[in-house]
Amino acid sequence: MLNLKQYNKEAIWKFLSEVPDPEIPVISVVELGVVRKVKVLTEKVIITITPTYTGCPAMKAFEDDIISKLNDKGIENVEIKTVYSPAWTTDWMSDEAREKLRKYGIAPPIKGTEDKGVLFGSDSKIVSCPRCKSKNTTLKSQFGSTACKALYQCKECLEPFDYFKCI
C-alpha cells in the first residue's frame, strides 16, 4: 500500500497547478480557483472543488483530469469532494490567470462580483478589448463560446471577443 505521507500538501498543489481548465487550457484549475482544499491522509488524497456555476459541464472533466494527474504522479487513491457553498466567484481567480486570459484573447472578469446589470437590461461595465486594449467595446450577446462568457466586439479593431463574466 502506498504511504501518502511522502507527499505534502505543497507537492499536491503543485501537481494540481499542472491541470489545465478543460475549456480554457492556458489557465489551471488552481488559477481558476475551483480547487478549494487539499487533504493528504495516510491512504488517500481528498481534493475539494467548487464548480464555477451549478451545472457547469466542465465539472466531470475537472474531476477526471485531477484524478488522472495525481494517478500519473503515483497517487492512486484520490477522492474528489464537490462543495457548493460558498459559491465560486471570479474573485477567486488569480491575477496571473486574469493576465493569461487576456493574452489568450479573452477579456478577464472585472474585479468584484457586482455584475448584476444584465438582470435589469443594462450593461454599464466597461470591458477592455484583450487585443488592442480599447475601452470602446459593446456587448453583442450575454452568451459567448461557453455559458460563463459573454460575447463582445471592439469598435476600434472590430474584433469579437469573449468576456469571462463576473460571477
Image (cartoon, rainbow, N blue to C red):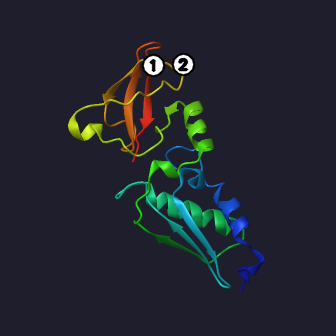
Q: Amino acid at mark 1?
A: Glu
Residue 129 on image: x %, y %: 48, 24
| Vertical side of 80 occupied by 30: above or below | above
Q: Amino acid at mark 2?
A: Cys
Q: Nearer the viewer, residue 147 or 117?
A: 117
Residue 83 visible in the displayed image? yes
Q: Which residue is mark 1?
A: 159
Residue 27 on image: x %, y %: 59, 45
Instruction: Please identify, in this view, whether the residue under mark 2 or under mark 1 is nearer the observer.
Output: 2
Q: Earlier in the sequence, mark 2 or mark 1?
A: 2
Residue at the farthest right position: 6
In which quadrant is the N terminus drawn?
bottom right
Q: Few, some or many C-alpha atoms within 10 Å of disc 2 (few <14, some 14-19, many ≥20)?
A: few
Drawn side of residue 46 relative to residue 110, left or right:
right
Tag 1's secondary structure? loop
The residue at 49%/58% (across/down) is 61
Residue 156 occupies which quadrant of the picture? top left
Q: Which residue is mark 2?
A: 132
Q: Few, some or many C-alpha atoms within 10 Å of disc 1 (few <14, some 14-19, many ≥20)?
A: some
The residue at 53%/55% (across/down) is 33
Residue at the farthest top position: 156
Residue 20 visible in the displayed image? no
Residue 152 on image: x %, y %: 38, 27
Drawn side of residue 32 relative to residue 72, left or right:
left
Residue 102 occupies which quadrant of the picture? top right
Drawn side of residue 120 relative to residue 10, left or right:
left
Drawn side of residue 113 relative to residue 3, left or right:
left
The residue at 70%/60% (across/down) is 14
Whether label 2 touches label 1, CB < 8 Å: yes
Residue 10 on image: x %, y %: 72, 65
Q: Nearer the viewer, residue 10 or 117?
A: 117
